[in-house]
Amino acid sequence: MIWNPQVECASRKEIAALQLERFKASMAYTYENVPFYRQRMDAAGLKPEKITSIKDLERMPFTTKDDLRDHYPYGLFAVPMKKIVRIHASSGTTGRPTVVGYTKNDIKMWAELISRIACQAGATDEDIAQIAFGYGLFTGAFGLHYGLENMGVTVIPMSSGNTERQIKIMQDFGSTMLISTPAYALYMAEVARQMGVRPGIDVKLRLGMFGGEGSTEQMRSEIMKSWKIFATENYGLSEIIGPGVSGECTALCGMHLAEDHFIAEIINPETGKVLPLGETGELVLTTITKEGLPMIRYRTKDITYLSDEPCACGRTSMRMAKVQGRSDDMLIIRGVNVFPSQIEEVLLAMEEVGPHYEIILTRQGYMDRLEVRVEVLDAALLDSFAALEKLQNKIHTNLRAMLSIDAKVTLVEPNTLRRFEGKAKRVIDMRDAQN
Ligand code: DLL
C-alpha cells in the first residue's frame, strides 16, 4: 500500500513545483521568525520575496551542529515555547546536546512521514509492532511510535534493553514487527537462539524496520535469515525531524526521500560545492514545512548519493543510497551518537588521569563494545586494587552520564599509550574488520 499516493507518486515536475512553493513560503516564515537566519539571508542579499528558484538556496551558507550548539537550547526555534509540544535531543560535539523542538503540526507531519515509511516496508494495520529503540530524548522510539499508531498499527512501547524480556514479550504478545537498530536486532536474535526460541515457529515476527545507524547488506541478510523476516533500512536525524526523512520500500533499492518536506543537496564536503545528481558526497537538507525548528542547508555529515531513476514500487521520489560513512569524527555506538571530544571532556575533567587515551571499538557477536584506555598520572595508583577499581567506576559513571552508554574502562601506566607526531589517532575502530 502507498500511504499518500498523490504525493508519493506525483510526477517529478509536480514535486519540483510543490518544493518551490513550499521553499518560498518556508524562507519567508524563517526570515520572519528566526533572527539567526534573517541575518544570514540579509548578508547573502537574499530577500524571501525575491526567490524564484530552488537554486537560490545555494546562496545561503550551511547550518551546522555548531550553530545549534551556539544557540543552545532554544535559540533557533521559530515559535514561542508555548507552541512547542515536544523536545528531543541528540549528541553535540561537546557536552551540549543538540536540542530540537516540535509544534503540534510538526508532530502530525512527522507521524505522517513515519506512516509513509512503514507502508513502504509493507506494514498494515493488522501488525503489532514492538519498538525496541530507547524511549527518551532519542527521536527513534517516539517517532516510530506516533507514526505507527497513526496508521493503525498496534504499538508495544518496549524500549531498548532487557533482551530476554523483549523476546518473551514478542512471543506472548504476538509481535509481528520489530523496530530497532540493526545491531540490536542481531543481538536479540542471538539471545533468542540461546533461549531456544525458534523464529517463524515460536514468534510471529514478519517484518523489521531498522535504522538510526548504518548497516551492511550482509547484516541485513543475517537479520532476515535469523529472524525469518523482511527488513527495511530507514534514515533520519533529529535536527531535520528524526526518523522519516527517508526509508526503503519493498524493492530495497535505495531510501525514498520525503521531498515534499525536505530539499536534499549533495555537496563536496571539502569545498562545499554542490555536486551533480548521482555523485557521492555529503547530504545537506533543508526543511520546507517545519514550524518549530526550520533548518536551512543543514550539513548532515553523512556521505551518500541520490538517484531519481524510476522505482519498481511506483513511487517517484528521489532515493538516497546507504550512508557510506561520515565526514566528521562522530561515532555511532549501539545507535548512540558519540563524539570522541565528549570522551575527552570527561577524562580531562578528572585529576587522576592524564590527557593520553585511546578509544577502542570492537564488535562481540553483533554488539558494539566501547573501551576507553587512559593513562593514570600516578603509577602508584595501579598498585592498589581498591583505588584502581574506585577510579575505574568513577570514570565509567562519568562516561555514562555524558554518553548514556556503558564503556569498559582500562587504566594503564603513564607513558604506555602511543604518542603522535602529527594528528592524534585516538580512535581504533575494529568493528568492520570483525564483520
Ligand atoms: O538516529 C534518527 C533515526 C532513528 C533514524 C531511528 C532512523 C531510525 P540522531 O540520533 O539525530 O537521529 O542521529 C542521526 O544517525 O546523521 C546518521 O549519521 C545516523 N543514521 C541514522 N540512520 C541511519 C542509517 C536518528 N539508516 C545520525 N544509516 C545521522 C546510516 C544513520 N546512518
Image: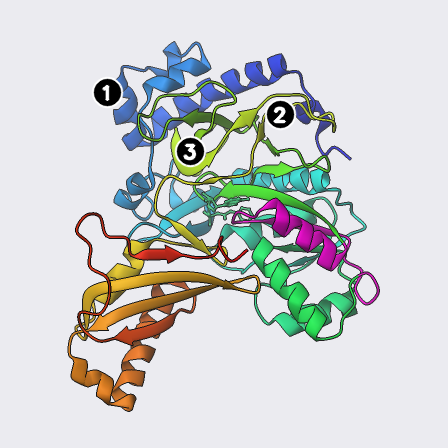
Depth check: give the residue in front, 160 or 294: 160
User: Disc 2 marks which amino acid?
Assistant: Ser
Depth check: give the residue in front, 432 or 223: 432
Q: Position of residue 178 (x, y in %)?
A: 68, 56
Tell which tag, 2 or 1, sits nearer the viewer.
2
Tell which tag, 2 or 3, sits nearer the viewer.
2
Residue 408 horizontal side relative to residue 118, left or right: left
Q: Position of residue 28 (x, y in %)?
A: 40, 21
Q: Does 406 sit above or below residue 237?
A: below
Q: Residue at x 17, y 80 (%)?
A: 379
Q: Quadrant of the N terminus?
A: top right
Q: Residue at x 26, y 64 (%)?
A: 357
Q: Residue 182 occupies which quadrant of the picture?
A: bottom right
Query: Mark 1: which secondary structure?
Result: helix
Q: Is residue 393 magenta?
A: no
Q: Residue at x 35, y 26 (%)?
A: 32
Residue ID for mark 1: 43
Q: Does 352 sit above or below residue 288?
A: below
For the residue carrying disc 2, how many other residues have a C-alpha within 10 Å: few (<14), some (14-19), or many (20+)? many
Residue 187 horizontal side relative to residue 348, left or right: right
- Mark number, residue 294: 3
Residue 284 horizontal side relative to residue 133, left or right: left
Q: Answer whether residue 231 is visible to the viewer in this image.
A: yes
Q: Residue at x 41, y 25 (%)?
A: 29
Q: How many marks overall?
A: 3
Alpha carbon separation for disc pair 2 and 1 = 33 Å
Which segment is the magenta one?
A: 200-228
Is tag 2's residue or tag 3's residue first in the polypeptide sequence? 3
Query: Mark 3: which secondary structure?
Result: loop
Assess whether mark 3 and mark 1 are in contact (beta carbons under 8 angstroms): no
User: Disc 1 marks which amino acid?
Assistant: Ala
- Mark number, residue 317: 2
